[in-house]
Amino acid sequence: FDISRVSIKDNDGDSDLVQVTYKIFEQDTNGTLIAEKTVSLDRTSQYTPSSETITPDSEYSIKSTQFYTIVVIGMDEDGNEDSVTAEEVTEDSGGENLEGNFG
């Protein structure tokens, strides 16, 4: 899965965003978790990679007729976290734009 734009911001003024986790589920968040990726960061106020690729688990084959849900979770050094979700994503969606603020 290619996510074309991600922007996660820590809005509590202490610039301590330290982790971003991506989770991809079949159908919705009650479905099977098929991929997970965690990015550890040095303390920062914002995470905005130009794109992100999340690869499904090796035993999973992406189905062109299946809908997926992508959840991105940002966590700061204080343990605050928030998430942003894209639903009904398909293999051919052409990338998703995900933005979230927390803190």
Image (spheres, helix red, strand yellow):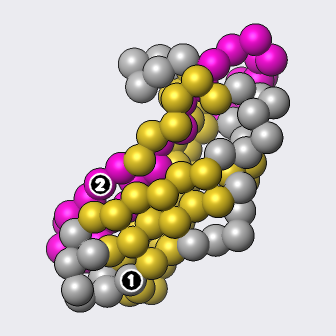
Q: Visible in this render: residue 54? A: no
Give the residue displayed 75% in from the left and 33% down from the top.
93
Residue 39's spot in the image, x, y percent? 53, 66
Q: Is residue 66 magenta?
A: yes
20 left or right of 66 in image: left
Give the crowd class for mark 1: few <14, some 14-19, many >=20 residues within 10 Å. Answer: some
Give the residue displayed 40% in from the left and 58% down from the top.
100
| Pointer 2 residue | 82
Q: Is residue 71 magenta?
A: yes
Identified by mark 1, the residue type is Ser
Q: Nearer the viewer, residue 85 or 63?
A: 85
Helix, strand or loop at label 2? It is strand
| Pointer 1 residue | 45
41 left or right of 1 in image: left
Q: Earlier in the sequence, mark 1 or mark 2?
A: 1
- Report the magenta residues as a range: 57-83
Q: Are marks 1 and 2 in contact (CB under 8 Å)?
A: no
Q: Residue furthest top?
A: 65
Give the residue displayed 39% in from the left and 72% down from the top.
9
Give the crowd class for mark 2: few <14, some 14-19, many >=20 residues within 10 Å. Answer: some
Helix, strand or loop at label 1? It is loop
Q: Tell me the distance, in whole angstroms, between the alpha carbons under discs 1 and 2.
A: 14 Å
Quadrant where the image shows the C terminus? bottom left
